Amino acid sequence: MKSLLIISFIVNLSIITFSCRQTNPSALDYGKLSYDTNKIAIFKWDTSKYQFPNNSEPLPLTQEDLQVVDSLIKDGVDSFNIQVSPKLYQSFHSKVPLDSLLIKQDNYKFQYFPFKDVNGKRIMSIIGFSASFEQWKKEVYQPKLHYGIKMFELKINLSEKKRDNLHSGDFG
């Protein structure tokens, strides 16, 4: 009788444990997320790529994460165009058209590098570029010297929903 009671207890405990499990809506299979694959490539965690720190971990993403990233990229680009571009214009003695110093987000493709840092923060490192690069979905974009605003980098903290300043060339 005692063994039957123990078995019954174990079975009930197992049922309760498995039935109370929360389903995780985040995905490491980024292909299940909805995003514009003609503009965005999400790289899987691979510490051989310098964007992923050696002491980092893979980061599952949600659809909400991608919306936050999109919003913070737009905010970073707008901030660059309002604060940095006019200073660049002045540094060229107003001889270069201001329009040529603005980042036009629609002209860029983006490479996303999601990871968890050593503090457990959810980080998205981003490269945006407007240059032609056929292997952009498989290889990390590597700019040449003096790339100006043809490429920018941005780091987003998804845990805090904050971004660093956008960096382009030596600007930002």
Image (cartoon, rainbow, N blue to C red):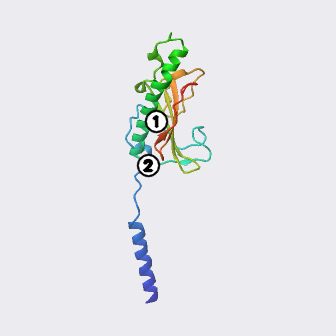
Task: Locate residue 171 relative to residue 29 in the image: left or right.
Answer: right
Q: Secondary structure at mark 1?
A: strand
Residue 113 position, x and y percent, is: 51, 39
Q: Is residue 161 above or below residue 14?
A: above
Please tell me how crowded label 2 is: few (under 14), some (14-19), or many (20+) other residues with Cα within 10 Å. Answer: some
Q: How far apart, in angstroms, are the residues tagged by discs 1 and 2?
A: 15 Å
Residue 124 position, x and y percent, is: 50, 41
Q: Is residue 49 above or below residue 55?
A: above
Q: Quadrant of the N terminus?
A: bottom left
The answer to whether residue 37 of the structure is visible from this angle is: yes
Which numbered tag is attached to residue 27?
Answer: 2
Q: Is residue 73 above or below residue 93?
A: below
Three-letter code for the amino acid on which mark 1 is drawn: Ala
Q: Residue at x 40, y 76 (%)?
A: 12
Which numbered tag is attached to residue 3?
Answer: none
Q: Residue at x 48, y 25 (%)?
A: 83
Please tell me how crowded label 1 is: few (under 14), some (14-19), or many (20+) other residues with Cα within 10 Å. Answer: many
Name the one closer to the observer, 172 or 133: 172
Three-letter code for the amino acid on which mark 2 is drawn: Ala
Q: Quadrant of the C terminus?
A: top right
Residue 127 position, x and y percent, is: 51, 32
Q: Secondary structure at mark 2?
A: loop
User: In the picture, residue 52 is in which quadrant?
Assistant: top right
First of labels 1, 2 by sequence position: 2
Q: Residue at x 39, y 45 (%)?
A: 64
Q: Which residue is mark 1?
A: 41
Name the one closer to the observer, 56 or 162: 162
Q: Residue at x 41, y 80 (%)?
A: 8
The answer to whether residue 131 of the structure is visible from this angle is: no
Residue 36 position, x and y percent, is: 38, 35
